[in-house]
Amino acid sequence: MNENMNIVNILHISDLHFGIENKNGIELPIDFKLRREFVLEALIDKLKVYSATTEIDVVIISGDVGFLCTEQEYEEFEKWIGDLLNAINVEPSNVIICPGNHDFDRSCKVDKITSENFLSLLSVDKISERISPFNHFQNMCQRLGVPILTNSAKVINDNRIDYLYGIYYLEKYNILFTILNSSWNEGEKVDDQSRWLGISLVRDVDLLIKKIKRDNDNLIVISVFHHPLTSMNRADSYEKYNHKETSYQHLANFTSLIFNGHTHGGVQEPTSINNDIKVFRSGAVHSTDTELFEFEIISINTLLWSYKQFVGKYEDSKWKIDEYNGVEGALDKYFSYGQKATDLLMNQFLGKGDISKFMKKMSPVVRNIFAILNKEINNQESQKKYNTEEDKELDNTIINHEKEMYDNLKTKGKTDQMLKK
């Protein structure tokens, strides 16, 4: 783990498409496979150098490992990912993988999911009937030794559903991963009509998470699935459908961060949805429909619920990694409770309200920020350099206000009570 015990660095890659050169009907250069292998080997070399100074803790692969979903493709991937993990010193137990639409074996026939039957077909007690298209994907996960997921379907059914949906708690980092499958249907061109997470399956992981959260209110939950929420069928996405709750609404109840792939559009700044959830989308590491090969590294501060985003790009026959906004040393950005905590503190600073009554409600992050504020407040003045006397005077005003704010809360007995918990 990194020297700062609160920092967790997550390598997020997606859309590797091993075996894409074997698809009939695609005209590719004769040296395409050699070029793809070169790009992927160069990625290992770059990440090996990067991880020598910035430790990578977790690897997320958000779907489309293969292209035609064959054993040969997954065996080729296993060799590559094994070399990558050795290069960056990450164990398979710290690798999170979800299936994508290209990890669906289309030679296996299952009933098509529609708006009329999705509640029945994507239920916990029926989902074992849909696992055959993912046998090659699950075999690969088992051979790699990636985490087996906890879900209720395994209790109800004898069939193996170890890697298709469920939760995995990385206690070392106090992060819980929710892995979902947006590819239960055979791959089709019209994503927004054929993609489903399954409300029953999302409710299942919601209940499993609640059991862990009873004794841990500082738990960060990261949800991983291949397709973005905008690709989901309307009955399973943003709004109530026929007065029924959807998967999206349940996700918003327990998720802090979401990681997607699929779009091949390159890394973008994360979007915000309900409760200040941040949605990250990695680019394709390799594809035929674009020369935009990208991935991202998200550095999470688990104490403050903040993050920094870095993007890896393949340009001029080499990989490079930079902060997303191009400004080295830019301030962290906040998500979920971290964002709400900073908003409350800013409102207090601007004189817009008393935050003491929100201290308990907004735990754990507010009390973490106040603990750090109390520890560092006396060092700020000596550490800063000022260009003008006006800058120094303004900064002294801010520091005095922070001290007064903290002393007022301490007098009311709120801060000490929060920090002792």
Image: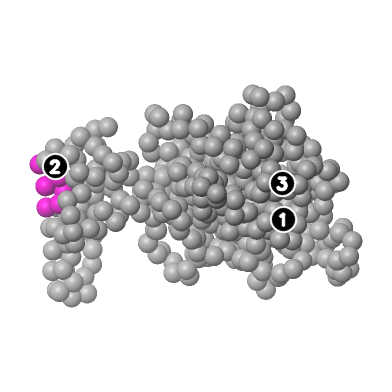
- At x 40% / y 58%, what residue is drawn? 333
Measure the alpha-carbon separation of dots 2 and 1.
53 Å
The amino acid type of the residue labelled 2 equals: Lys
Label 1 crowd (10 A; few <14 / some 14-19 / many >=20): many
- At x 36% / y 50%, what residue is drawn? 338
Measure the alpha-carbon separation of dots 2 and 3.
57 Å
Say above or below: 55 vs 321. Answer: above
Q: Nearer the viewer, mark 2 or mark 3?
A: 3
Quarter occupied by the C terminus:
top left
Is residue 45 shown to the viewer in this render?
Answer: no
Q: Camera-side residue: 253 or 65?
A: 253
Q: In the figure, residue 367 lies in which quadrant?
A: top left
Magenta segment's dominant SS is: helix
Horizontal side of residue 363 vs 396, given as left or right: right
Residue 113 bears which disc, if any?
3
Report x, y in % for residue 48: 62, 53
Q: Camera-side residue: 241 or 158?
A: 241
Q: Label 3 near label 1: C-beta < 8 Å? A: no
Q: Describe the element under mark 1 as helix, strand or loop.
A: loop
Measure the alpha-carbon separation of dots 1 and 3.
26 Å
Residue on which the image places disc 1: 16
Report x, y in % for residue 386: 21, 70
Q: Label 3 near label 2: C-beta < 8 Å? A: no
Report x, y in % for residue 80: 74, 49
Q: Describe the element under mark 3 as helix, strand or loop.
A: loop
Among the two numbered marks 2 and 3 on one chain, the one whose residue lies closer to the N terminus: 3
Q: Is residue 298 magenta?
A: no
Label 2 crowd (10 A; few <14 / some 14-19 / many >=20): some
Q: Is residue 410 magenta?
A: yes
Residue on which the image places disc 2: 410
Magenta residues (range) = 404-411
- At x 30% / y 54%, what residue is drawn? 342
